[in-house]
Image: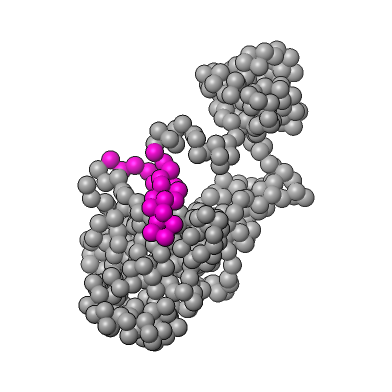
Amino acid sequence: MTGVGDGLRVLDFTWYGVGPITTKYLADNGAEVIKVESVKHPDGLRLTPPFAGQQPGLNRSQYFGNFNSSKKSISINMTTEAGRDLVRQLVPHCDVVAESFRVGTMAKWGLGYDQLREFRPDLIYLATCLQGQTGPKAGFAGFGMQLAAIAGFHHLSGYSPDELTPPHGPYTDFIAPRFGCFALLAALDYRRRTGEGQLIDLSQYEASLHFLAPAITHYFATGAVPQPQGNGSARYAPHGAYRCRDESGKQRWIALAVETDEQWQALLAVLGDDGGLSRFPRRVDRLAQPEEVDRYVGELLADRAAGEVVAPFQAAGISAYPVQDCGDLRTDENLQAFGFFASLDQSECGPMPYDGLAYRLGRTPGCQRAAPNLGEHTDEVLSGLLGLSPADVGQLREGGVLQ
């Protein structure tokens, strides 16, 4: 069985989140993705915990590993002209170049899109950064956590304008790769049909705004700026996460949403309560006083075990699930049935846990390998693609070009 990326070669200069996740999709599906970094300037995630065996090291970060599975790694000192010349020699052998440096960095090295097209005219070049390659703020540096604020996610997260709760982590880093991967696939298909490559300018800012479409559309239609409302909903009441407990009495939470009057009646029946029918008889009544509904439901659930009520709620057509933590995910029966979590043998650390693929292609299911050690494939790539001898590679290493 072959992968959909078989025969595709990518020269990968990306680091941290967006770029590595984008190219990982291709690597996990058969593409040869060659990650370029160096000991002096490694991908910053290599320095980020958690580390295998709780021992820090450039090859021991599981954070890095999860974003860079199935790739190869070569170590080239890009601050040297000889190192940059090696890149120019590699480009004709590659279908795609991907980079996520600050705007202008690659061009300053003589490795921008227009410069590399001289070596491969049909090259597809993906450049991704926070706010794109053009515009007055194109050169601004930052991470996904700051971009989530710029893009408006922070404004909508929380329970009031005075109690903002930013979304977890570098939120936009997990949005933009989905656009980047499909833009690459579209460009590859266009080249297949026309023989022409192109530049992909992926602004993580613009990509992320698509996830705020309802709020932005509301503003354009009404002129009113949507405000943070916590777990509130214009369609569902009750709607949110409610305290309950597990079978041992420890606090747990359950998330649920009720839309129709029939669902409301069913929820009260499961909980053995009939007072809610007279107090909040209709959907319009519940939507008009969501805080009172939340308090009422919260009191009914406080002494109930999440595991006892989820199944009858689901049987009654109510959307309800327990709130799981990372430990729960490791034992989740559906994820186990999918075989989602994989243990891959990393050459320095041994078996390490990895997230599996988020999709299952029937004919080309993909196949993951553990993330590479820094520079693990330098000799293999330079000899295989450029025909360099061991003596040539040794000389470059001694001269500080490969480090």
Q: How many marks?
A: 0
Q: Is residue 402 visible?
A: yes
Judge whether 282 appears above or below 63 on screen: above
Q: Residue furthest right?
A: 162
Residue at 39% in and 50% down: 344
Closest to the observer, 325 or 51: 51
Q: Tell me the residue at 49%/34% (across/down).
A: 332
The residue range painted magenta reads 339-362
Residue 22 lies in quadrant: bottom left
Quarter location, residue 249: top right
Left or right, 390 with reference to 352: left
User: Is residue 8 one of those drawn in magenta?
Assistant: no
In depth, the one of 215 and 26 nearer the eye is 26
Q: Position of residue 140 (x, y in %)?
A: 58, 72
**In the image, residue 41 lies at what x, y percent?**
49, 74
**Does the image show residue 206?**
no
The color scheme shown is: one colour
Question: Residue at (57%, 28%) from the top-left corner?
Answer: 320
Residue 227 located left or right of residue 365: right
Residue 350 on the magenta segment: yes
Please state, as top left, top right, bottom left or bottom right, where the C terminus lies in the image: bottom left
Q: Looking at the image, is 385 positioned above or below residue 339?
A: below
Left-right relation of 384 to 145: left
For image coordinates 44% across by 36% down, the residue present is 335
Percent position of residue 56, x then y: 54, 62
377, 68: nearer the viewer:
377
